[in-house]
């Protein structure tokens, strides 16, 4: 994506934020030499291959090839346009941006998203204020009964939606928010068949849902009695994607990084209750099943996820469905089942945080949990054992590590008292029917057709100019870049050459300014990430090799044109081309002699 803002404005923001600090807000980084490394948030891996260079202010993943500067990371991680990423980072650095130049389409997208966030901010203020109104006495009593301290209510900005059809609608109208925009934000609902709109949330405790930047992306609402639906959430909007939202992550992100653990619970009040008792690394999905994006996001903050489920069938099924997601993203997952009749909220209120954390220390790995649950339901009769194997074979097949999978097979066979080979056969059969890629995972993305890789020799010449600038004059003298086969790489090469000729420092962070498109920044990040030393003699040898490859390409092209001229009866043209070919051959022989004498 090209960047439609003044270069000096982009550079000012980039130089005012530290890429390590920014990325550390989303994932765990560790110092490794001059760089920082961590598990890549863009693909599944167990060994860190994601590298961040603080001096040149870029990141690069040696596993999946993603790379770029701080803007690229924020755009990819938060699904933002460049102007939104620029504004976010500028606000972080306390920089007031000058009016930016954008395409009409970019202007429309950014304006719409900004307007939706603004509508949500007005709605949050309305809900928070309404919680203190006389008509919210039932809501306040409900929160008091659930032992919600004021500090927690304030931190999570809880509010109340009055039991009226157009209370919020009227408030937003008074703030200048048109009804169509509030409807697009999911705050209002239009009557069937068109006509008037009414408030989506009525007579409910309101939970604002923050994105990872702290903005209000949507809302959840809970009734205070037995009315259905118990929970009501914002619909899908341009700024709210329930498959990417984790309630409480904005408040929990620091503690998740500190402890390396995230508790995944089922309800908003579970998150609040744990937070109120000092357990501040809990998150919850927003009224939807766990998705690949949820797992990919949370792994940027914690090495281990503890799923806290009820011991009922729904909790067990949720664990079964989530195991392949954690396996696909190489995230360690355990299961904590609380005593019958308890959820995290009631457990910490009855027994306290210490007992909860002790129970979490004894949480089970996923496969043993699923096995014990299946045995509890089916028993150990012959038919029961068969049902147990049938129920968990797909989950065992989803375990990617071969050694771990074989140990689970052995454990299951011993527990059930059956032949290990029989369990192995069942798992193998399940593996044959498993999809090779889970819908929505990074693996599915990687299956899409990739852009052709830049020519190896052309990439080597770019690398030489950046890391051995002394060879740049020779590249310019021989005009090598004009022979690059890729227009994109050729344009990047010319910018690098001009930058060096103008006295620019290829060792500094400014080198990333030369990459206009995201693909260019990924390529440049890959070049910069390989920091093995380059010496002038070796670079000159590569230049000579590239010259020879150009000559050979020209030679092959002349052969094609000579053959075409002869076929079409243009004998004079064929003769002239043959003379040109012979001159090329002589030049190549002379060059080879010079190279041999030099090296």
Image (spheres, rainbow, N blue to C red):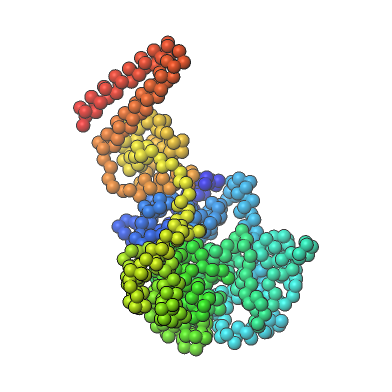
Quarter of the image for residue 222 reads: bottom right
The x, y position of residue 201, in whole percent, is: 68, 72
Task: State whether residue 140 is above or below residue 40.
Answer: below
Q: Is residue 214 visible?
A: no
Q: Which residue of the protein is positioned furthest toward the top in this rendering? A: 572
Name the residue at 40% across, 30% down: 483
Number of numbered discs present?
0
Name the residue at 38% across, 51% down: 56
Name the residue at 40% across, 48% down: 525
Q: Is residue 235 left or right of residue 505?
A: right
Q: Which residue of the protein is positioned furthest toward the right in this rendering? A: 195
The x, y position of residue 113, in whole percent, is: 62, 57
Quarter of the image for residue 135 reads: bottom right
Q: Is residue 391 visible?
A: yes
* Nearer to us in this view, 443 or 411: 411
Quadrant containing the C terminus is top left
């Amino acid at each position: 994506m090209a960047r439609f803002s003044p270069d000096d404005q982009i550079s000012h923001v980039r130089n005012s934020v530290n890429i390590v600090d920014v990325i550390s807000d989303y994932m765990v980084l560790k110092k490794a030499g001059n760089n920082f490394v961590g598990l890549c948030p863009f693909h599944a891996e167990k060994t860190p291959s994601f590298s961040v260079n603080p001096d040149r202010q870029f990141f690069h993943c040696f596993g999946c090839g993603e790379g770029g500067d701080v803007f690229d990371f924020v755009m990819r991680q938060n699904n933002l346009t460049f102007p939104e990423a620029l504004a976010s980072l500028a606000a972080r650095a306390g920089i007031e941006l000058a009016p930016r130049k954008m395409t009409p389409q970019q202007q429309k997208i950014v304006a719409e998203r900004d307007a939706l966030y603004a509508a949500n901010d007005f709605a949050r203020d309305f809900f928070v204020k309404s919680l203190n109104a006389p008509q919210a006495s039932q809501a306040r009593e409900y929160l008091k009964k659930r032992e919600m301290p004021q500090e927690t209510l304030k931190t999570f900005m809880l509010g109340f939606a009055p039991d009226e059809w157009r209370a919020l609608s009227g408030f937003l109208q008074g703030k200048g928010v048109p009804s169509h925009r509030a409807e697009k934000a999911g705050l209002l609902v239009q009557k069937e068949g068109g006509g008037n709109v009414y408030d989506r949330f009525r007579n409910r405790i309101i939970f604002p849902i923050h994105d990872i930047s702290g903005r209000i992306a949507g809302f959840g609402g809970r009734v205070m009695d037995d009315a259905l639906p118990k929970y009501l959430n914002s619909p899908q909007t341009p700024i709210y994607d329930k498959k990417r939202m984790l309630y409480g992550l904005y408040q929990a992100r620091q503690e998740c990084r500190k402890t390396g653990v995230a508790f995944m619970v089922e309800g908003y009040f579970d998150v609040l209750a744990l937070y109120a008792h000092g357990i501040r690394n809990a998150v919850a999905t927003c009224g939807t099943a766990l998705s690949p994006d949820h797992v990919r996001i949370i792994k940027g903050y914690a090495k281990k996820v503890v799923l806290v489920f009820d011991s009922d069938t729904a909790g067990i099924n949720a664990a079964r469905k989530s195991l392949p997601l954690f396996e696909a993203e190489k995230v360690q997952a355990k299961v904590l089942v609380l005593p019958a009749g308890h959820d995290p909220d009631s457990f910490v209120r009855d027994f306290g945080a210490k007992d909860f954390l002790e129970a979490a220390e004894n949480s089970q790995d996923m496969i043993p949990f699923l096995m014990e649950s299946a045995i509890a339901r089916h028993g150990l009769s012959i038919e029961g054992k068969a049902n147990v194997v049938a129920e968990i074979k797909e989950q065992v097949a989803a375990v990617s590590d071969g050694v771990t999978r074989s140990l689970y097979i052995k454990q299951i066979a011993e527990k059930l008292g059956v032949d290990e080979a029989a369990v192995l056969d069942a798992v193998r059969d399940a593996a044959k029917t498993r999809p090779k890629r889970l819908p929505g995972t990074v693996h599915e993305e990687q299956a899409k057709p990739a852009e052709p890789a830049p020519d190896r020799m052309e990439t080597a010449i770019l690398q030489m100019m950046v890391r051995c600038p002394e060879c740049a004059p020779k590249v310019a003298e021989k005009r090598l870049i004009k022979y690059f086969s890729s227009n994109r790489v050729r344009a990047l090469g010319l910018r690098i050459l001009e930058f060096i000729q103008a006295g620019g420092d290829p060792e500094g962070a400014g080198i990333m300014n030369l990459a206009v498109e995201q693909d260019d920044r990924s390529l440049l990040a890959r070049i910069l990430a390989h920091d093995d030393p380059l010496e002038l003699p070796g670079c000159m040898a590569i230049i000579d090799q590239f010259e020879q490859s150009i000559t050979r390409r020209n030679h092959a092209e002349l052969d094609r044109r000579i053959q075409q001229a002869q076929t079409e009866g243009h004998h004079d043209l064929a003769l002239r081309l043959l003379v040109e070919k012979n001159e090329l051959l002589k030049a190549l022989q002379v060059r080879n002699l010079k190279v041999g004498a030099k090296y």
